[in-house]
């Protein structure tokens, strides 16, 4: 009430771990503090005589120093709901429209078999069983089609944007909202939320795991341990990248609990006396230990054992132990389980046993395919990691070491730029939580860059921690700005000057390409004018620093730059996701099924109807070069389909099939089967890929491009317009129809 003493409590932007809130008592009059009686904020000076004209009076440091008042929670709920609706709409729009990717067809087909009662057996080639069970559930509810195939990832992608709420007290209200916004519009997260792969599930498990760790360290409630146990198990049941996730989370816990761990090692401290970080470390490590036995496969050459089979010619599945190696594998796994149990029971018998029971239950249910495939328990405990140990040297994809530098700079430049600056700041001036946020993206980036297999969908894991760090840093920046006085004194000029500066810089970079007919004198004159404009803008910024202070001026400039980057991010995500989503003009696409194939699948369906053969119509698919996929998904209901490789199974005479699809390299071989009774072959692209000419670029050439403006033009043309000097890679096929089918009806 005006002129009366009042007390206001609110969340503070940079709280101490023990004091996340701030209470201010004083007189609030006519929209400003007239007198502050007391405050418990350490970095807000207590005063009893406050000048009513000061910036502090106009802008009390609510939520970190510069907001007049914190957003009421009811408005926050509205913003989160709006973001969720937008995220859900973006992920659901035309979800089934894109041609099914090779990997999606594998995931879809085996989920369809599970849905139809044919069961499922865990195969680490396709990662964990969670994807197949949840997709089979989607088929049960909504039918088996491209939409329901991608529905679960889309829903998880939408739920992901709500996860910052779990860390809201640590992040601050503003930062949490900003992170949700970045998660909503991130190009990588948007694209792979509409893709039937495991990666978006892993992203949700990872963020919630991090949240449970910090919430447990705040109040030590056992429920956070139980959630952690479930998340560890779900992560392993989803994808083997969980090994990287738990390692990245465990390392800072070990650092925070180092005195407890060393005290236990030297016999001076019991495990039951460890601090919360140590307790969480015990839970994560003991639940992971039984899963790491197969790493011994790295030593199998030295030991003379087969601990992780890496030779496909043996007929054994990759990653399994064999012979004496099987006995050794059982011994190693048993030892790890017993050792983990001993440590867990020494820490907290009741809590650990409940946590272990939760994790074990999830593991058994999913890896046994709901008690129908008990062999899945062995493959989950050993082969899951063993397969990737055997595959590490294969380095599928053959991507360069700087692969994620390239992907991140093209798609996730906003969180990466802010995050790198924030990491430096928090490394020196942060608390335990913000130092973790600084460590998390850098360690994740290093881990995935060091891994042998680099794929575009792993960018999801790389960018995720950058978004949390960037959102926290940007929220803290916004909270330190004194908006009303700064804007009143001319700060709004920044939001005009920054776009002008960007346009001028763009013109300078492309100056010689603007009008090729211009002479050297004209080009020089234009350069002088452009540099003159930049000089005027620099003078204007200097003037602004004199008016509102250098910190406020630079802060507003940073906000304006971030705003432009945010607009470009939204555009980048939209183009990558909705503009020709199954034509690989994007680095996010590895190899993509051609949209022509999806159209052809509809033609085959029409042909089945016209011939009255229905799902019994005979179709020949040349299985050369993996062309079996994605046809196995598209033709899953057809009962008379052959997938033989025609390069080996040569036809001896005319075929009685109604449709034949032949790889271009087997066209001549298949002629004996298709030259009579078939239409002339129609060529179409079966799969296409982004032209990966960058693979020949060395590190020195890569950085040389960054520091030489003369080489920026091609990079910027791709960055903004996706202009490429190379055509798409393609592997083609021919399709032949029985000449008795009225083809006009197929058009």
Image (cartoon, rainbow, N blue to C red):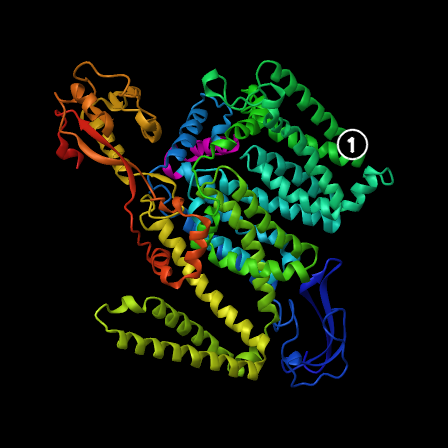
- Judging depth in this view, the residue of 27 and 12 nearest the camera is 12
- Judging depth in this view, the residue of 298 and 564 nearest the camera is 298
84, above or below 334, in the image: below
Q: State whether the magenta stretch is mostly helix, strand or loop.
A: helix
Instruction: Say whether residue 14 is visible.
Output: yes
Q: Which residue carries the number 1 mark?
A: 345
Q: Residue at x 81, y 37 (%)?
A: 265
Q: Residue at x 46, y 33 (%)?
A: 135
Instruction: Say whether residue 663 is visible.
Output: no
Numbered label tally? 1
Q: Secondary structure at mark 1?
A: helix
User: What residue span does the magenta drawing correspond to?
Assistant: 127-147
Quarter where residue 226 is shown: top right
Quarter where residue 343 is shown: top right
110, above or below 727, in the image: above
Q: Residue at x 76, y 76 (%)?
A: 46
Q: Position of residue 9 (x, y in %)?
A: 70, 67
> Magenta stretch containing residue 416, yes or no?
no
- Judging depth in this view, the residue of 172 and 593 nearest the camera is 593
């Amino acid at each position: 009430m005006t002129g009366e003493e009042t007390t206001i409590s609110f969340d503070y932007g940079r709280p101490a771990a023990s004091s996340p809130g701030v209470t201010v008592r004083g007189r609030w009059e006519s929209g400003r503090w007239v007198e502050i009686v007391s405050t418990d904020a350490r970095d807000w000076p207590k005063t009893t005589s406050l000048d009513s004209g000061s910036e502090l009076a106009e802008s009390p440091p609510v939520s970190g120093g510069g907001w007049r008042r914190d957003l009421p929670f009811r408005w926050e709920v509205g913003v989160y709901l709006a973001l969720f609706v937008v995220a859900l709409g973006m992920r659901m729009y035309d979800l089934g429209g894109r041609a099914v990717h090779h990997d999606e067809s594998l995931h879809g087909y085996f989920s369809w078999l599970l849905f139809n009662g044919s069961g499922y057996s865990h195969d680490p080639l396709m990662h964990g069983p969670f994807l197949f069970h949840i997709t089979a559930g989607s088929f049960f509810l909504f039918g088996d089609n491209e939409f329901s195939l991608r529905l679960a990832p889309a829903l998880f992608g939408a739920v992901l944007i709500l996860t910052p709420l779990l860390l809201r007290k640590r992040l601050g209200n503003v930062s949490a909202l900003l992170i949700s916004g970045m998660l909503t519009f991130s190009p990588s997260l948007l694209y792979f939320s509409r893709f039937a792969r495991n990666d978006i599930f892993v992203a949700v498990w990872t963020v919630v795991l991090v949240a449970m760790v910090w919430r447990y360290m705040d109040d030590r409630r056992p429920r956070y341990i139980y959630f952690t146990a479930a998340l560890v198990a779900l992560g392993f049941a989803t994808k083997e990248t969980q090994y990287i996730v738990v390692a990245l989370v465990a390392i800072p816990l070990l650092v925070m609990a180092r005195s407890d761990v060393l005290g236990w090692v030297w016999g001076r401290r019991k495990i039951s006396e460890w601090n919360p970080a140590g307790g969480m470390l015990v839970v994560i490590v003991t639940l992971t230990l039984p899963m790491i036995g197969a790493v011994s496969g790295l030593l199998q050459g030295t030991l003379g054992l087969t601990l992780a089979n890496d030779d496909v010619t043996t007929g054994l599945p990759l990653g399994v132990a064999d012979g004496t190696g099987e006995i050794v594998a059982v011994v190693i796994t048993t030892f790890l389980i017993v050792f983990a149990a001993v440590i867990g029971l020494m820490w907290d018998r009741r809590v650990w046993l409940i946590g272990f029971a939760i994790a074990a239950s999830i593991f058994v249910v999913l890896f046994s395919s709901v008690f129908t495939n008990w062999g899945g328990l062995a493959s989950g405990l050993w082969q899951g990691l063993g397969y990737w140990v055997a595959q590490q040297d294969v380095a599928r994809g053959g991507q360069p070491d700087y692969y994620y530098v390239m992907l991140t700079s093209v798609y996730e430049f906003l969180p990466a730029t802010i995050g790198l600056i924030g990491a430096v700041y928090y490394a020196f001036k942060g608390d335990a939580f913000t130092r973790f946020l600084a460590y998390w993206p850098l360690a994740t980036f290093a881990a995935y860059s060091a891994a042998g297999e680099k794929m575009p969908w792993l960018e999801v894991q790389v960018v995720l921690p950058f978004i949390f760090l960037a959102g926290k840093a940007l929220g803290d920046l916004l909270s330190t700005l004194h908006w009303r006085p700064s804007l009143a004194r001319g700060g709004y000029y920044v939001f005009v000057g920054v776009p002008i500066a960007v346009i001028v810089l763009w013109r300078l970079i492309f100056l010689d390409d603007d009008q090729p007919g211009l002479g050297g004198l004209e080009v020089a004159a234009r350069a002088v004018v452009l540099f003159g404009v930049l000089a005027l803008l620099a003078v204007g910024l200097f003037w602004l620093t004199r008016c509102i202070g250098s910190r406020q001026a630079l802060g507003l400039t940073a906000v304006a730059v971030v705003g432009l980057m945010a607009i470009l991010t939204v555009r980048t995500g939209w183009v990558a996701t909705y503009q020709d989503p199954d034509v690989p003009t994007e680095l996010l696409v590895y190899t993509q099924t051609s949209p022509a194939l999806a159209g052809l699948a509809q033609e085959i369906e029409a042909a089945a109807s016209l011939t009255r053969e229905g799902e019994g119509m005979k179709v020949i698919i040349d299985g050369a070069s993996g062309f079996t996929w994605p046809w196995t998904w598209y033709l899953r209901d057809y009962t008379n389909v052959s997938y033989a490789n025609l390069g080996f199974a040569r036809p001896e005479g005319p075929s009685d099939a109604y449709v034949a699809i032949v790889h271009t390299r087997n066209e001549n071989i298949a002629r004996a089967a298709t030259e009579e009774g078939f239409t002339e072959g129609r060529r179409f692209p079966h799969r296409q890929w982004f032209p990966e000419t960058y693979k020949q670029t060395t590190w020195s050439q890569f950085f040389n491009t960054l520091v030489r403006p003369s080489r920026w033009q091609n990079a910027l043309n791709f960055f903004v317009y996706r202009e490429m000097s190379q055509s798409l890679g393609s592997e083609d096929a021919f399709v032949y129809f029985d000449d008795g089918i009225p083809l006009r009806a197929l058009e």
